[in-house]
Image (spheres, grey):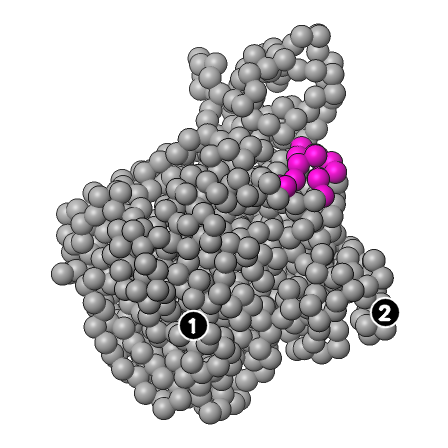
Amino acid sequence: MELKKILGQREFEVSIPEGSTVKDLLSWMVNKWGDQLSNRLCKPGSDSIFPHIRLMVNGRSIEFLKGMETVLQDGDEFQMLPLVAGG
Amino acid sequence: MYNGGYTGKILRINLTDQTAKKEKLPLKVAKDFIGGAGFGVKFLFDEVKAGTDPLSPENKLIFAPGPFTGTTVPCASRIAVTGKSPLTNAVGMCLSGGHFPAELKHAGYDVLIVEGKAQKPTYIWVKDEEVRFRDASKIWGTQTSDCQQIIKDELSDQNIRVSCIGPAGEHLSRMACIINERRAAGRKGLGAVMGSKNLKAIAVRGTGSVEIASKEKFKIARSQMLKAMKESPVLYSEFAKTGTPSNVDNTCALGIFPAKNWSATGEFRPVEQIGVEALETRWIGKEFCYNCPVGCGQLRLARNGPYAGILAEGPEFETLYSLGGQTGVDNMDSIIAADRLCDELGVDTISAGVTVGFAMELFEKGILTLADTGGLELNFGNHQAMNTLIRLMAFREGIGELLSDGVKIASTRIGKGAEKFAMHIKGLELPGYDVRGAKGHGLAYATSYTGGDHNRGYAFQEIFGVPIPYAVDRLSIEGKGKLTKWNQDVRAATCDCPTMCVFLLDTAMAPTATENTAALMEAVTGLTYTPEEVARVGERMNNLAKAFNIGEGFTRADDTFPERLMTEPLKSGASKGQLISEKDLKLMLDEYYTVRGWDVDTGIPSRKKLVELGLDYVADQLGIK
């Protein structure tokens, strides 16, 4: 919810240079949405993502891919999911 | 000896001869099983013979809060209700929250066992030491909120708390639940067990309090728990505001929000229509269980169309799945109305919704026709038909008679290949996670002692990415046996037995769950445990529950999935292409039985394992050498 409010939309498409990684994409996003976004993703002054934010590429957590160095391909779906609780 | 937490009393009520006896809670039972589900499973195994008809007077209903219930330990006002399930013929155990659990403790009881059958509709009135059997003829047939209010008025005390059934339980629907306030001991058809005993309600008023063994230790243990809750990044900041429905958004993103009887998962993703934002516009307030600082219960008001003005506590995530995704209904107001209807009629929202979705698929495939449905157009998405069908099932009228006992029984009666579309495990309709995209969560469904149940071994590592005890890949099958044992035993030991809210485990307490339970047990009851011994309580309870099911004839073959999950890959979304093949299931089960110390071929616990858990008598009773 909060992330959606910051980004202004639930889903969007972006064009990034070939060979870009998850880290590159996050840098691009932080550059675009500034502190408001970076403060939701990591502690001020740190670049490690909060453990309660899950980053996924095509439905798979990046820790089971190549982490922040995971290279994004054309058509990939990147997701940022905050931790919630079940029912 | 315990010197706090427990009142030390079991109240045994026999409806046949209208007697109420008070027995002492044995120290060994308290130490070995803690309370709640542990007590329920223990008394069920010991007192209900194998082969008992769940709807006969010989079945029992065991109401057991936990040792912290009624104290100021946060989020502990919960009660386990256990009996043999008429839906599964296995252990039926589910938990409810609210204020009834604390009231029962304040009245002085750790356990209330109901046995026998009353000759006419009856309700039980417990006021501290006093127990009365009262005529329920006038309230037989009432909806659950009316029933509760009439009893309070009749007894002239608005502070009474009532646990009761609605018309579904009276009509012995095997999907019937037990309601207290607006909370449900929802699953496994225990409302029908209550109905079969002619028991409409249990009304309780307690004026006592629960002793604390060490006030000094209690202060420390409680503040440590509150600190962990405060430090959670989501408990107060997100969960307290939205409750469970945010999981609609989450599971849709993961491609595992089941849709249209599990035929369109990943394809039908109604996030905008029934996700958190849609609910925000209908929010009017919160409800708190006794001594809960979180208040995940959200009151919501239907705003539009013929449903405008209907209020429900909820809908919870599971209800948004069952009455939304599963039925293809994306009309939020109709789901609020159907949720309220289920609560009033006393029917489990998950089983009801899954059964409606099942009937809709059969209708669309021509297996059920307009002649069968009495003219009801049961297409996916038809919310009017959904609300009508829920009522018909609760009263066993028309097509409702065929569907009132859930999808397993209905599919057998319908035939024509309907079994293939019946989404259940061991007879229990599946909850809201398409486990083709969460394999460990799936293994928990397949091996749960209660059947297809999300709450007995919830894989929050897969669903939320919580890396406790370690991070796992939701799409992999490796290591899921070990993970499932951990999830089942830790959840049983730290939530189901002490009757602590499971949402705390997911959002705040996972890293310190067994330590927290051990510290609270020592402070509240005086009984000491290591964190490992706490987990061992969960393992003991899960083995005993398994033993009960073995006595009922369950085998390895029952630890399985509906055919669809093993043969039809998900067609779209973030879990596209995923399924759990028969081979995958076999590999996961082999690992699971091995880490459990159970025979890999049969799934029966070894004598060595049972003896290790102090369950020698169980091995003897089942003839395990």
Camera-nearest residue between B409 and B171: B409
Residue lying at 35% horizontally and 74% vertically, measured from the top left = B47
Q: Is residue B145 above or below residue A15?
A: below
x%, y% of residue B510?
38, 39
Nearest to the observer: residue B192 or residue B554 = B554
Q: Which residues are magenta?
A: B568-581
Which kind of residue does numbered mark 2 sit on?
Leu
Q: Quick one: A8 or B58, which is closer to the camera?
A: B58
Q: Is residue B120 visible?
A: yes
Q: Residue at (52%, 28%) from the top-left corner?
A: A53
Frontmost residue, B240 versus B283? B240
Q: Residue furthest front?
A: B625
Mark 1 neighbour density, 10 Å: few (under 14) some (14–19) many (20 or more)? some
Residue A31 figure quarter: top right
Q: Circle 2 sits on which residue?
A: B370
- How far across and how far down the image is residue B343, in percent? 57, 67
